[in-house]
Image (tube, coloured by chain):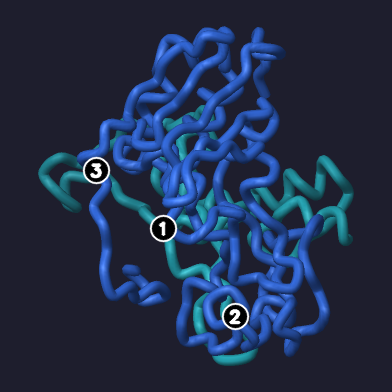
Chain colours: A cyan, B blue
């Protein structure tokens, strides 16, 4: 679930912006560097596979962690292409990039 | 002050002033004290019932912790600013350092002003493309609020739309408040309140 949430963030929110004149990060606070809140995420469907991995840990849980981010960001980019016909090749995909393409 | 943009030699604590009241005015509008906290205003029955636009605008800004501390007068007095104002490592900012130019004009300015800005080139002392950060002020302007201020010259009332000024030839000045004046309250008229929302 965390991986999917950060995938949404990767695809549509997060952008560390470096000023070209002196190399400073210009949006170095959470007021300007946006991450998703509940209203951005909506409903996530998390499937439990029901096959514990007891070698990994006593609880049997499996962690794929950040691998979940990769697929989610790509899936959102594909969904935007599917919906608009516009292939944006630079994250985050924001309305101004869609308007300009 | 946290970013060392402002380095005042002295500060006056106005927290003890009795200006936190939200009350009905004789004309059927409301008066919001300058020290009324954003949370208290947003959740006040008179505001929720009569001015949902204001309540919604307040609740869309900042976080609960900030809204619990942020005051009505303080919200108005936020600097019109951008990241280049906040980061003192950028030498050019006409708002922070009058006459120094504008680093934002040739920098990253995706969220900067389209209307009301001054663009005379990045080296001009008049250029400024920053926006005011307040959600509350947008609602106040739409509701045709009035700002009550008091100073050595006595009391006066400033129509909300005239309180914040455009950069014009002096981007370092954000408001029409005169030296020594303090905001005491913001009043909202009764007309047009109904069930406006956004």
Q: Position of residue B135 (x, y in %)?
A: 57, 40
Q: Secondary structure at mark 1?
A: loop
On screen, residue B52 above or below B194: below
Q: Position of residue B142 (x, y in %)?
A: 70, 30
On screen, residue A81 above or below B197: below
Q: Dot 1: few (<14), some (14–19), or many (≥20) neighbours within 10 Å?
A: few
Task: Return the residue at label 1.
Answer: A66
Q: Tag on residue B93? A: 2
* Residue plotted at (42% across, 10% down): B45
Task: Report, in whole angstroms, how far the alpha carbon at label 1 lies from the one at label 3.
Answer: 47 Å
* Residue plotted at (77% across, 64% down): B117
Q: Secondary structure at mark 3?
A: loop
Query: Which badge, 2 or 3, is on the more N-terminal residue?
Result: 3
Q: Are marks 2 and 3 on the same chain?
A: yes
Task: Return the residue at label 3.
Answer: B15
On screen, residue B198 above or below A59: above
On the rendered image, what quadrant is the N terminus of chain A found in?
top left
Left or right relative to B27: residue A87: right
């Amino acid at each position: 679930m965390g991986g999917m949430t950060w995938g949404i963030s990767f695809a549509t929110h997060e952008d560390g912006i470096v000023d070209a004149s002196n190399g400073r990060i210009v949006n170095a606070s959470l007021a300007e560097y946006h991450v998703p809140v509940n209203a951005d995420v909506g409903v996530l469907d998390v499937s439990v596979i029901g096959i514990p991995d007891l070698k990994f840990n006593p609880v049997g849980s499996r962690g794929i962690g950040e691998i979940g981010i990769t697929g989610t960001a790509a899936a959102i980019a594909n969904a935007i292409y599917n919906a608009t016909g516009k292939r944006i090749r630079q994250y985050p995909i924001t309305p101004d990039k869609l308007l300009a393409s | 002050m946290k970013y060392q943009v402002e380095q005042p030699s002295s500060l006056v604590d106005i927290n003890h002033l009795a200006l936190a009241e939200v009350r009905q005015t004789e004309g059927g509008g409301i008066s919001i004290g300058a020290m009324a906290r954003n949370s208290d205003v947003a959740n006040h029955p008179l505001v929720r019932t009569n001015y949902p636009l204001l309540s919604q605008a307040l609740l869309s800004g900042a976080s609960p912790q900030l809204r619990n501390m942020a005051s009505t007068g303080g919200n108005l007095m936020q600097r019109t600013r951008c990241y280049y104002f906040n980061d003192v490592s950028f030498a050019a900012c006409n708002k922070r350092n009058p006459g120094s130019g504008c680093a934002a004009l040739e920098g990253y300015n995706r969220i900067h002003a389209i209307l009301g800005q001054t663009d005379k080139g990045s080296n001009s002392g008049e250029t400024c493309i920053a926006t005011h950060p307040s959600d509350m002020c947008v609602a106040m302007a739409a509701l045709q609020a009035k700002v009550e201020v008091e100073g050595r010259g006595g009391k006066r009332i400033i129509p909300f739309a005239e309180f914040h000024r455009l950069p014009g030839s002096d981007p370092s000045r954000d408001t029409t408040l005169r030296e020594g004046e303090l905001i005491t309250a913001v009043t909202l008229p009764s007309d047009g309140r109904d069930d406006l929302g956004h």
